[in-house]
Amino acid sequence: MKRFIIASGGTGGHFYPGFSLGKELRKRGHEVLFIVRKGDLAIKTLERNGFSYKQINFTGLPRSLNPFKYFIFGCKLCISMVQTAVIIKNFKPDVCVGMGGYISFPLILWARLKGIKSAVHDSNTKIGLANKVCSKFTNLFLLGLPTSDNIRNTKLVGTPIRPEFGLPYNKAEILAGRGLDAKLATILVFGGSQGSKQLNIAVSKAAKKIVRKNNTVQFVHISGDKGYERLKQEYRGFRNIRLFAYCHDIYFLMHAADFVVCRSGASTIAELYACRKPAVLVPYPYAADNHQYYNGTVLKKAGCAELFIENENLSSQLYDYISGVAKNKNILEFMERGFEVLELPDPLKSAQIIADEVEKL
C-alpha cells in the first residue's frame, strides 16, 4: 500500500479527473488524501464519498495590473506553502499528484524539495501556466490531449470521464422519454459549466430557422438555469425543439444524438471521443490562454468536428453548417470515421491508466 496526496479542484474540469484517480487508487488499497482550495465546492463530493481532505488558502495568479492583487497573491502563496508543508509532514506521502491549476503548485514544489516522487496531469492540449511551472519540478507529466508545448517526461493518458458514458443504452427509449422522435435527426446542444449565454442565443436563432424549413430535424437544447426562461419563450410553438435547464443523464443524450453543438473543454472533448459523436465546437472565449480553442483543433484536424468562434456571425454559421449536415448524412459518416484516426486513450479507462503510472513512481 502507498500513500498518495492529490491536489485537485477549482473547477469541475480539474476536480473530476483527480476524484476519479482517487477512487481508483483507493479501490487498489492505497491511502488517499486530497488537497483542495479553502471552501472549494468539491469538498461536498469528497465528504459524500468518504475521502479525507485538507484545505489550503491559495488563489490563482491575478490577470490584472492591480499591485494590491499581486500582494494578496504573494501572501496567500506563502500561507499555502506553509500549510502544504504541514500536510506533507503529517501524512508522509509516497507520491504527490497535481491535477492541474494553481492548487497543484505548492504540493509539487514541496515534493521536489523533499525528494518525494510526483506527477502532474493536464487535460488540455494547451498547457496552463501553473502546470508549465510544475513541469520543471515533477517526475512525470501526464497529458489528457496531445500537446505541442515543450514539456519533458510526458505520457498521453487521456482525461477520465464518468463511467455512465459506458452504460448500455436504447436510443429510441432515450428520445421517447423526452418527447422526441427517434426517426428524426437529433441535434444536442449544451454550453457546459461556464459561459453559455451567447451560445444559447446563437443556437436558438439558427435552430428556429432550421426546423421551420426542415421537418426531419429536431433539437434538444440544454440551456442551463440562467438561460432557461428566456429560451422557453423563444421556443414556444416549436414542436421539434425540446428545451431543458439541466440534464442529469447527459451521457445517454449524447449517445442518442446524431450531432452535438457544444463548448470544447477537455472533459467535453473526452466525452465526444468516447461516444464518437460529430460536433460543432464553439470554444468558450474567456478560457485561460484560449485553451478551449486549442482543444477543439484536435478534433477539427481529425475531421471529427467543425470549429466556430463566438462572434456576431455565429448564428448564421451554425445555420449554414447544420442545414448542410442535415441534407447530407455522408458528412456525419465521414466525421465519425475521423475518430478512428485520433488514437487517444479511452477516457473510460483513463483513471486506471493514470493510476498505473503513478503507482510506478
Image (cartoon, rainbow, N blue to C red):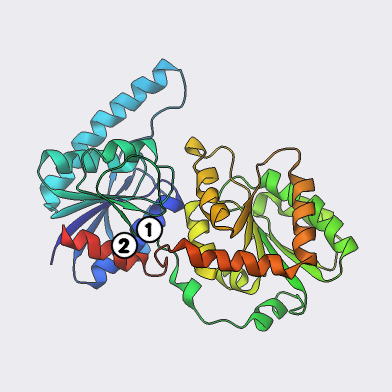
Place residue 85 in its image quadrant: top left
In this rendering, the answer to whether 2 lies above or below 227 is: below
Label number found at residue 84:
none
Return the residue at label 2: 21
Marks 2,1: beta carbons within 8 A: yes
Q: Hey, what amino acid is under mark 1?
A: Pro
Secondary-structure class at tag 2: helix
Nearer to the camera, 286 or 213: 213
Query: Can the viewer see residue 155?
Result: yes
**On-image quarter of the C terminus:** bottom left
Q: Position of residue 159 (x, y in %)?
A: 40, 59
218 over 169 or under it: above or below: above
What residue sits 41% from the left and 68% below the top? 346
Q: Split into 4 quadrants, where in the image is the N terminus?
A: bottom left
The residue lying at 29 percent from left, 43 percent from top is: 104
Q: Position of residue 170 (x, y in %)?
A: 61, 83
Mark 1 crowd level (few <14, some 14–19, many ≥20, 10 Å Cα): many
Q: For the residues marked 2 and 1, what is the alpha-carbon distance in whole angstroms?
A: 6 Å
- Residue 244 lies, in percent from the top left, at 69, 63
Query: What residue is shown at x 86% (from left), y 69% (from top)?
Result: 215
In the displayed image of the protein, which residue is found farthest to the top?
A: 67
Report how many numbered discs are placed on residues in the image: 2
Q: Residues within 10 Å of mark 2 (few under 14, many from 20)?
A: many
Q: Nearer the viewer, residue 154 or 194?
A: 154
> Which residue position holds label 1?
17
Q: Secondary structure at mark 1?
A: helix
Type of amino acid at the residue the image marks with label 2: Leu
Residue 31: x percent and y percent? 19, 63
Examine the rendering and report whether any part of residue 277 can be seen: no
